[in-house]
């Protein structure tokens, strides 16, 4: 197993980063009631309160529990807030996270304060734990985006269509797209340098590319609407077999969160509530199946994650996660993190697709060009969109 | 359709009854947090908050909406809090009641106050609406028991096993049981007199009984434990076919909420949290299947609902609901309530079993000798137990 | 437990009855290929070949296995062809009967011949085994009707819509219906006399009836079509709650096996293949839910099984099984058959409804006025129809 | 879309190949009864009869239906025997292929003869149809292996454990394995030359490899048994997350078709019936999850499909399909076949894994070094095994 990566921040930088990340999670929960924070609208989504607790459990399990004298806030939380770490013992079933009305939100906030206090001496002592601390913070940033995707899903399940916040974040509009050409050849893929990176971004290695071009912008709502209006959801030939089955089983006829008003006009459910559809905004809440079908309809294809990364210095990204045509496989020579964190990424490397880029809801600085997000092909509740490519 | 029954209480009695019932519902919610009140632990159970709102919706739909000038608290609540009345329009899906974090508990309490205020002039005006008001109150009393059964289920799903309240209600212990003999013959069954009764208790009619005897007490935990220890859950011959299938599919080996400690000793999850098993308390949280299997093991049988009612003036009841051997069928000449309340009981008269008696959690005075409760044969989360009978 | 009933036939009558029943089962399979005899189109239906083997297994298990010197045809068949007798050991799972391509049809016919040969000395020796023999034959007659219902279901699942036989049995048309009045009072219900009866028809006992009338004929296709055309399947108010859920989940808009041609005209899939709808034929392949909804739409109700039996000497029956408004409960004083046959009927006495009368596919003489058939409320693949009743 | 590939065989070679392939399919069905040929033991498997018909339908749909004057054997077969071609119209649902007792086996053989007769003039006329004919034959060869995997699954579902044939094919034993080293660098991947290849094997393209070594032999039963006995199925750390979930849900503790006798000894269900476990035979009937877990336990990994292909001229293969660590993705520049065959492979390129090599049941000459087989990660009923690799 690989050693933990050397953290980039200086000791004082790490302390500031810790403070910023921990506070930001609580700020994300601030517009929500205790009831809002407790709900789980589907097995894939988690309660906001659970995210707040689990990210604290991570510091407790990976760092604090190894320090002599640490007293856990509540010994039973190791069962409640373990997500999927078999090596750390049994855990509460994922689909039942929504039944945990206790501990209440107040208790979870007290648990966070307890963990923060216990982390003080760790942050004071640069060295041994810095890499783990950094991992814990990057981990918490991943959950910060999930707080938004999961509460959006929960609110959409409520016929009242509540808004998360009137000034909630939203994606910037697309600009006119051009084509970025790439000549192919051997490309270096994966995280470079010594800074923090997840294990799945390493090792950096060479990949052979064939000449291609890639769009400078993601697909917009206007473009996706043309697909819908041209019968995109009604014609099997654009679809992967499993995608077409989903279209029929689930009755998909538009991205998730698109609303059809009585007069046939379209609006969107957003973190600000139901809003008029902005044709220039990037299309999002798409499954891989829809992304691939759109590309087929457009006579293009999705880029591989390697094409995406190799060309990423020549286009803008960061408003929506972008499905790639690449299965989530380990890089050659992949080594998982050490210790309990060995389960972090590697054990999910089958049956999922890689998304690249980051979204408007991704914490600033969290996701860079080598960052690999991943979801099953049918997932739609993420801020997931499309960037087109084609062979040259 | 039958006219609504004449209410028994005098006008001032009705006002007092209204105040008592409405306050009691809120008192039941008082030990709970807003999060506790929002959770739904299975499709058959509802959030406490939903019970609080639905019982108010009932007054709104059956009475207030017919009064000129009534302004609903929120027009969308007719969709959210309709339980199963097809005639009153579409409704939020039952298994998704737990996603309704909005309206929050505070708003629901405000909704209750709004309905109570609007009911003031109705209560001032004895006459037309009294029968409906009384039905609304009896209906709310039914939900008061469900508030307790449903939060118990939710708390049991939480590994922390929270207590509802340290002084929560509990069943009185059984006393030594004797046999009550009945000679059979024609018996009058169903509600007598002009007082309030549910439509399913009427009309009063004659039923032919055959000589039998019936226990003076429900089965106790001690007795049920003997069944368990004698292999009751391990031998097919005691079980109805569908019950035996359940035993195997669900791994039943004790009533719901029985806990087995590491040393093999038994305790129970109660509204007061986990407690030592009281051998004298009535066995409860049993399905019909378990009740029938226990009776077969004991060489007895369950009474029919008619036997139960005919003999009920000669034994004590009211600590646990008692499964009968009677399917929930309409009485000869059954007429549903008038208007929207026609759906109250009649449409459920297939595939369920009748329970009689009432439990320690049933509001005092709510259930009498002719009262017919009903649940599917596999239901275990009610306060449901056993009274034995046999042929003479 | 009750002793087995005394058989009515004389010894020579029993031998002739044995020969007739056993031959008739094989005659029913004669129009079918080996492939047809092996198919299972749903868990509730069984392959024809399985029926042929199971009815032989019954003689083997209940009689032959207790006779010294009997050598089973194949010891493994006791596992393969046990239907549901827990007391006789484990068995092949019901939903997987269709995977049993071995033993082939030829082997099953050889198994039948083996059992028939072994039964010869039993039939020669009147006495001890006569009651069991008679039960075995009545049992086989029950399966003879199932052979037809099950192959009909399998053929309907085949887009080629094969006919079982061009001259297959079909129900006689309804005649104009009149009302038969009954004054109510105490009625004797259950099988009278010493002849063969199933355990569920006993003991004969008194039931109190209230004045009613009952139709002299079952409901015809013409009448049921009027229900359909009046929106019967589109209006919740006619339906039991669980029935309405089925209508929506399954998309029911006509009885099972009704076909809608491209021009909107109706035809039926029958044992003779697809045929024009005969408006005078009794409506059949109805669930209890549809029967009850039709009755509600017609302003009538279904009879109880007691009303049906009490009035049955005054109307014709026998073309379709008639759903009653009675749950399948044990009679007062019910005793199951002795020995392994104790599981025959009693363990199914919950969650099902009683049907009375017999159908055109019921072997002649098999079902009389006290005969109790039973199926779950949603079952539609039986020859099940409607007889109306109402209060006087 | 790509043009169909040029067929390699000469015209007379094609005719001989046609005769050989078509006869071989029928020879595979020869040991089976009509009942055996009709059964479908799970949705993923098809009846032998269906394979016989579908492979004929392929010639009919792709070639004969485009020839003037062709009269189909039965116009309804285009619905019954279309597997998954949306462009060729609706089709019988895959999980219900087992209900098709009609057409009987005899009729399906007559259908095959009809198609063969109609293909005569096509085979006489070299040219236009040769590529399609060759595709049809390669397609039929794929189904020949499925005939064996599917009947094996069906027979295993039968408690009698019938043998397909006493002399049925079986895998050759493994020989001692050595390591084959590969220096990495750019490798040419995909089918070379003009001979027949499936669309998913093209285009040939360069892939960058990193130094690795790969076993010269597949994993044997002896080696896999060591994994089992070392607790391989009991320790999460060897497993992908989704694989570990399967282990627990399905109770996996050995490969499919391994039997545990009462004395604990192991045997295998084979096409020859239950046989003693041969420790030297290649382990097979493994899912990808088991293959990956074995590799993790052994401290190795699975090869990528590119590593496999690049090194394949230096090891023996062909006894079992070998799971690779590669998701089934399109090659750069992938073009599906023309016309209706565009759906042949491309639409399945998500969520599956590539297997390489071929098995003892693969028709001789069918699968070469560039051949890409693919199945979902949990599939176990194929003749699928393991070849190990590791980084250098």
Image (spheres, coloured by chain):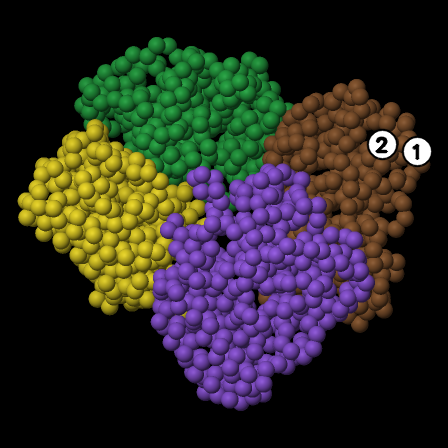
Chain colours: A green, B brown, C purple, D yellow
> Relative to residue C128, is residue C57 drawn left or right?
left
Marks 2 and 1 close (CB-CB < 8 Å): no
Residue B25, image x and y in percent?
79, 35
Give the residue drawn at x 87%, y 31%: B128
Give the residue drawn at x 33%, y 29%: A238
Q: Nearer the viewer, residue D354 or D293?
A: D354
- Under circle 1, the secondary element is helix
> Relative to residue D194, is residue A270 drawn left or right?
right
Determine the image quadrant of residue A335: top left
Residue B69, image x and y in percent?
79, 19
Quadrant of the drawing holding the N terminus of chain C: bottom right
Which comes before the other along the chain, label 2 or label 1? Answer: 1
Chain under callout 1:
B
| Residue occupied by mark 1 | B11
Residue B218 showing in the rendered view: no
Chain under callout 2:
B
Residue B52, image x and y in percent?
74, 33
Determine the image quadrant of residue D176: bottom left
Q: Nearer the viewer, residue C111 or B292?
A: C111
> Relative to residue C57, is residue C103 drawn left or right?
left
Looking at the picture, do discs 2 and 1 lie on one chain?
yes
Q: Nearer the viewer, residue A307 or A119?
A: A307
Q: Which mark is residue C75?
A: none
Give the residue drawn at x 44%, y 79%: C115
| Residue occupied by mark 2 | B129
Q: Nearer the viewer, residue D290 or C207?
A: C207
Outermost residue toward the bottom in this view? C125
Q: Is residue A316 above or below residue D220?
A: above
Residue B280, image x and y in percent?
78, 59
Q: Label 1: how many residues lie within 10 Å, few (<14), some (14-19) or many (20+)?
A: some
């Amino acid at each position: 197993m690989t050693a933990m990566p050397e953290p980039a921040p200086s000791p004082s930088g790490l302390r500031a980063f810790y403070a910023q990340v921990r506070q930001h999670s609580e700020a994300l929960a601030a517009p929500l009631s205790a009831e809002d924070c407790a709900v789980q609208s589907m097995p894939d989504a988690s309660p906001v309160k659970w995210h707040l607790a689990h990210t604290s459990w991570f510091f407790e399990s990976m760092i604090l529990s190894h320090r002599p004298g640490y007293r856990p806030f509540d010994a039973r939380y190791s069962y409640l807030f373990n997500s999927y770490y078999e090596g750390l013992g049994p855990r509460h079933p994922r689909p039942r996270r929504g039944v945990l009305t206790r501990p209440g939100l107040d208790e979870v906030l007290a648990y966070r304060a307890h963990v923060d206090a216990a982390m003080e001496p760790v942050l004071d002592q640069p060295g041994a734990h810095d890499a783990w601390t950094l991992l814990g913070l990057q981990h918490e940033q991943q959950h910060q985006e999930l707080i938004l995707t999961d509460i959006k899903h929960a609110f959409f399940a409520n016929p009242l269509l509540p808004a998360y916040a009137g000034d909630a974040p939203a994606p910037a509009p697309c600009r006119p797209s051009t084509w970025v050409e790439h000549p192919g050849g051997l490309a270096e893929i994966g995280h470079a340098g010594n800074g923090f990176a997840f294990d799945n971004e390493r090792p950096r290695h060479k990949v052979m590319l064939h000449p291609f071009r890639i769009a400078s912008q993601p697909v917009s709502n206007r473009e996706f609407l043309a697909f819908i209006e041209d019968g995109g959801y009604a014609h099997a030939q654009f679809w992967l077999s499993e995608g077409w089955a989903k279209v029929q089983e689930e009755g998909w006829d538009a991205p998730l969160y698109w609303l059809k008003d009585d007069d046939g006009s379209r609006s969107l459910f957003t973190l600000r509530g139901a809003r008029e559809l902005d044709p220039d905004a990037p299309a999002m809440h798409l499954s891989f199946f829809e992304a691939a079908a759109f590309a087929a309809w457009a006579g293009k294809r999705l880029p591989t994650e390697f094409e995406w990364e190799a060309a990423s210095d020549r286009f803008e990204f960061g408003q929506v996660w972008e499905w790639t045509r690449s299965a989530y496989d380990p890089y050659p020579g992949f080594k998982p993190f050490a210790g309990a964190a060995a389960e972090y990424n590697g054990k999910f490397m089958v049956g999922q697709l890689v998304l690249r880029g980051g979204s408007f809801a991704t914490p600033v600085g969290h996701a860079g060009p080598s960052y690999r997000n991943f979801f099953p092909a049918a997932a739609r509740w993420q801020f997931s969109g499309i960037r087109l490519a084609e062979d040259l």
